[in-house]
């Protein structure tokens, strides 16, 4: 049995989960509503404030989907009740971040500024304290979309291993390399 798939999901107060005939799971909570389509072979059951995901057979395909759909539904429950947050740090001289409406403006050392239109489900804040690196905080109820937006922003200027300049997640550890002078 899948270690992740067999774990029941406890449904917090204020969160409603419904499964329709097409096996689409809808989760509604205080922060919003999310829906995902679950494969027809996987069974989703809600009873007594817990949600369980079961698979019909031990086929490799069913085993692969069992833990996946349990994790997706768990992220939906957590998203509509608490929400998700990712913080990005801009490390480099002259790197700046500002928010204009729902557009994120980044100065990342290129000859021009980079503008990113954020989806409606993602909110952002940009904080620049004197003497510290700018921090961009992204919030959303959809963990998949949040990770995708954060990865897109990070891909604009990946962290280089010599000086450590670039866009990184807060707390991310970067393996640094020694330069040419270290080999002599």
Image (cartoon, grey):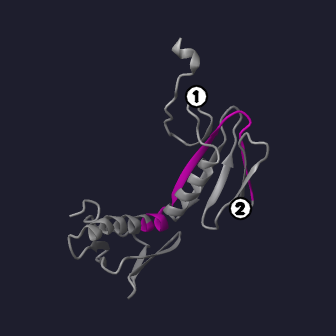
Instruction: Please name the residue shown 58% across and 28% down the image.
Output: 162
Instruction: Please name the residue shown 21% across and 74% down the image.
Output: 57
Helix, strand or loop at mark 2: loop
Is 146 drawn above or below residue 57 in the view shown? above
Q: Residue furthest right?
A: 111
For label 2, the residue is 102
Horizontally, residue 22 falls left or right of residue 53, namely: right
- Percent of width and height locating residue 47: 29, 78
- Percent of width and height locating residue 123: 63, 60
For label 1, the residue is 162
Mark 2 crowdedness (10 Å alpha carbons): few <14, some 14-19, many ≥20:
some
Horizontally, residue 129 falls left or right of residue 43, namely: right
- Percent of width and height locating residue 25: 41, 78
Give whichever of discs 1 and 2 has the lower sequence position: 2
Q: Are marks 1 and 2 in contact (CB under 8 Å)?
A: no
Q: Residue furthest top?
A: 184
Query: Residue 146 is drawn in which quadrant?
Result: bottom right
- Part of the protein shown in magenta: 76-100
- Percent of width and height locating residue 80: 48, 68
Mark 1 crowdedness (10 Å alpha carbons): few <14, some 14-19, many ≥20:
few
Q: How many numbered marks does the figure carry? A: 2
Quadrant for the N terminus, please.
Answer: bottom left
């Amino acid at each position: 049995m899948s270690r992740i798939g067999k774990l029941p999901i406890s449904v917090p107060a204020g969160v409603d989960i419904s499964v329709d005939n097409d096996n689409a799971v809808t989760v509604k909570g205080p922060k919003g509503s999310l829906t995902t389509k679950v494969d027809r072979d996987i069974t989703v059951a809600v009873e007594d404030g817990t949600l369980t995901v079961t698979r019909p057979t031990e086929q490799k395909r069913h085993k692969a989907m069992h833990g996946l759909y349990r994790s997706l539904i768990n992220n939906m429950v957590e998203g509509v009740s608490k929400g998700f947050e990712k913080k990005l740090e801009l490390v480099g001289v002259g790197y700046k971040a500002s928010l204009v409406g729902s557009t994120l403006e980044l100065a990342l050392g290129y000859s021009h500024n980079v503008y990113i239109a954020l989806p409606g489900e993602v909110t952002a804040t940009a904080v620049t304290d004197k003497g510290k690196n700018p921090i961009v905080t992204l919030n959303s109820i959809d963990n998949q979309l949040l990770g995708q937006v954060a990865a897109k922003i990070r891909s604009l200027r990946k962290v280089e291993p010599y000086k450590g300049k670039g866009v990184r997640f807060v707390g991310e550890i970067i393996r640094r390399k020694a330069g040419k002078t270290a080999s002599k």
